[in-house]
């Protein structure tokens, strides 16, 4: 099966970037797959080329790549405004094309598959620029018109796609993603000496609760801080993630506390140490399409307190403490329960984390994704 994939997202350094790179690497190792990798970038063309070259080393000669030296915005103009598609010209033998939910090639003769990670821009439109929403809406329209097969990374997102975007249920398929390979590689190569260096650099000398993610309203940081505040004498709250926009301005007194620390964006090594040293991961988000930090915390044996909404209970199962994210009291009770668990309860929770992690792996992701590719090809042939 000859599969075209747009690998442009790997340059964005977001969750979709790791999903793209990990999926491509898993597919590249399959004997029944030949990849046709496509990407566009001017500033980071070399990065795309290096990744494609590394992938093409798997089963040498089977995989091909073409990286265009113009910005993704030019690609958007060519496809959306001019309706020009050159995927078939570049890869005449491609059987199906896997794109992302904000940009689709305008080719009715090319079977399409697209991954939609979440619909946060519809659930929380204030988190996206109007032009970004418009771009996605055009893309979703193309997907519906071409009867594309859609992959979602959770049942929660599948329900959203059917309800909000009105896709036929039979065209929407759940394929859970998995723990990023980068996280596994970092944890394997971290020496004790390096871990100690990072602990000193980050001044991790007190017990702490960890929050991970960009500071934006749906991450629910304001309620997380309020829930933790009465516990501040016993445990710090450390927030790791890029500065965005949040609703913490009204918490000026709490923001002045030395027990509340904002580290900003951290490296993979630093994040691994933070997970490993934390008393628990506090992840009370209002909405997630998957909730990758839950699996990351499980990998490091760190207990999780997370929301009982959207995809989070689906991913965490019974291995995490679930709370009502709109209730500060519920979040606080979840924190206290985990912090005060006895050794036996802690061991049971750890065992549940290990069992849960076994459900997610990239080989399974590749297998299930290939099933969707085959269905897209079959349905297209029947038209």
Image (spheres, rainbow, N blue to C red):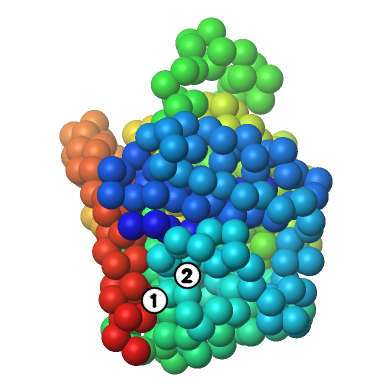
Q: Which corner quadrant of the image does residue 151 belong to? A: bottom left
Residue drawn at point x = 42 percent, y = 67 percent: 96
Q: Which corner quadrant of the image does residue 107 belong to? A: bottom right
Report the disc number at residue 114: 2
Residue drawn at point x = 62 percent, y = 50 percent: 66
Q: Is residue 324 visible?
A: no
Residue drawn at point x = 51 percent, y = 83 percent: 108
Residue drawn at point x = 54 percent, y = 16 percent: 195
Relative placement, left or right, of 61 versus 78 is left
Give the distance between the C-alpha atoms of the residues marked 2 and 1, in whole angstroms: 7 Å
Q: Position of residue 180 (x, y in %)?
A: 45, 42
Q: Secondary structure at mark 1?
A: strand
Q: Position of residue 289 (x, y in %)?
A: 46, 66
* Residue 95, placed above or below residue 344: below
Q: Position of residue 130 (x, y in %)?
A: 76, 81
Dot 1 corresponds to which residue?
Answer: 149
Relative placement, left or right, of 56 versus 366 is right
């Amino acid at each position: 099966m000859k599969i075209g994939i747009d690998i442009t997202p790997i340059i964005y350094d977001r969750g979709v970037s790791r999903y793209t790179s990990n999926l491509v690497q898993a597919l590249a190792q399959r004997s029944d797959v030949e990849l046709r990798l496509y990407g566009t970038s001017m500033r980071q063309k070399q990065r795309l080329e290096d990744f494609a070259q590394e992938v093409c080393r798997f089963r040498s000669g089977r995989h091909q790549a073409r990286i265009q030296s113009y910005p993704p915005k030019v690609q958007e103009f060519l496809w959306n405004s001019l309706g020009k598609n050159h995927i078939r010209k570049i890869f005449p033998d491609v059987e199906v094309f896997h794109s992302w939910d904000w940009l689709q090639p305008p080719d009715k003769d090319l079977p399409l598959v697209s991954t939609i990670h979440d619909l946060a821009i519809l659930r929380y439109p204030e988190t996206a620029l109007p032009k970004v929403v418009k771009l996605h809406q055009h893309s979703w329209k193309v997907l519906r018109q071409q009867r594309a097969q859609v992959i979602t990374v959770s049942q929660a997102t599948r329900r959203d796609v059917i309800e909000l975007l009105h896709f036929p249920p039979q065209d929407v398929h759940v394929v859970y993603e998995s723990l990023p390979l980068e996280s596994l590689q970092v944890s394997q190569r971290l020496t004790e000496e390096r871990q100690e260096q990072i602990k000193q650099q980050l001044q991790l000398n007190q017990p702490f609760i960890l929050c991970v993610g960009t500071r934006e309203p749906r991450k629910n940081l304001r309620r997380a801080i309020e829930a933790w505040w009465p516990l501040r004498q016993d445990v710090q709250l450390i927030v790791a993630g890029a500065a965005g926009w949040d609703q913490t301005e009204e918490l000026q007194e709490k923001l002045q506390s030395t027990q509340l620390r904002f580290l900003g964006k951290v490296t993979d090594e630093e994040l691994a140490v933070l997970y490993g040293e934390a008393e628990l991961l506090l992840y009370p988000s209002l909405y997630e399409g998957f909730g990758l930090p839950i699996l990351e915390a499980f990998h490091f044996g760190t207990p999780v307190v997370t929301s009982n909404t959207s995809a989070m209970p689906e991913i965490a199962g019974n291995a995490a403490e679930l709370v009502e994210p709109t209730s500060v009291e519920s979040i606080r009770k979840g924190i206290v329960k985990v912090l005060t668990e006895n050794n036996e309860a802690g061991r049971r929770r750890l065992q549940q984390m290990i069992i849960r992690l076994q459900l997610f792996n990239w080989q399974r992701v590749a297998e299930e994704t290939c099933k969707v590719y085959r269905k897209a090809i079959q349905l297209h042939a029947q038209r």
